[in-house]
Amino acid sequence: MFGLWVCRESSLISMKTTKVDKVLREKLGAKEFTSMLTMCEQCGVCSGICPLSKLTDFRVRKIILRAGLGDIEAIKSSDLWLCMMCYACLERCRTGLEIPDIISVLRTLAIEDGNVPDSTIKVAQMFLKTGHAFPISGLTKKMRKELGLDEIKVDPEAMEEVGKLAEKTGFKKLVEGK
Ligand code: SF4
Ligand code: SF4
């Protein structure tokens, strides 16, 4: 199956590597994803449905391919952090690959490898500080008011729980470097 992938990939995206990275594959194998990855047929339906494909060069099919090959670029590329976990690809994949879960595992491996984009760290910092992953600007507040929506409020108790979880899981240390 991997041979087939390499053949398809070289003709479609000129992927330079055919070298299998045993370390990455062992790590994925430890998470029981290796056998799942070999089921990918490289049909491209996931990339076709992914909303990011319309706006960026992000192609989830390539990430799945690289992960299956153990290509270390799968966890080095900042593309890995673009996925919004909308699950559209999961619903369409006819082989039932749990694509968002695979991306989560790859992100964990990327973190262990020290590959987290600054922009992602900033979003996480903002979330820990404000409870939002993006700034609630005056314009957002105005638009919500015009639409008759409630003012956005953050529950202090929920924030306290998030803080505790972030502390216990090491998330806080990761994003704040403390
Ligand atoms: S839809 Fe599923 S089988 Fe097709 S390329 Fe994507 S992950 Fe592979
Ligand atoms: S879960 Fe991620 S990869 Fe899948 S369709 Fe949504 S944004 Fe794309």
Image (cartoon, grey):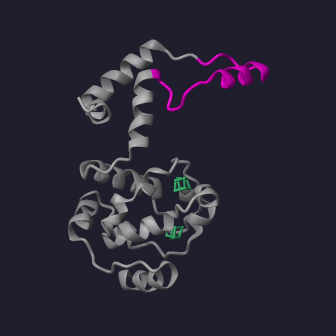
Q: Is residue 117 above or below residue 15?
A: above
| Residue placed most toward the observer, 30 or 12 | 12
Q: Is residue 168 above or below residue 111?
A: above
Which image quadrant for residue 89?
bottom right
Could you tell me residue 64's position as x and y percent? Answer: 43, 66
> In which quadrant will I find the C terminus?
top left
Q: Residue at x 42, y 35 (%)?
A: 122
Residue furthest to the top in view is 156
Which image quarter has ligand 2?
Answer: bottom right
> In which quadrant will I find the N terminus?
bottom left
Q: Residue at x 26, y 49 (%)?
A: 114
Residue 168 colored in magenta in the image: no
| Residue placed most toward the observer, 20 or 95 | 20
Which image quadrant for residue 161?
top left
Q: Residue at x 38, y 42 (%)?
A: 118
Magenta span covers which residues?
Answer: 130-152
Residue 141 colored in magenta in the image: yes
Taking the image as shown, residue 144 lies to the left or right of residue 154, namely: right
Q: Is residue 96 above or below residue 100?
A: below
Could you tell me residue 65's position as x and y percent? Answer: 42, 71
**Number of marks in the rendered image:** 0
Q: Residue at x 56, y 64 (%)?
A: 46
Could you tell me residue 138's position as x and y percent? Answer: 65, 20
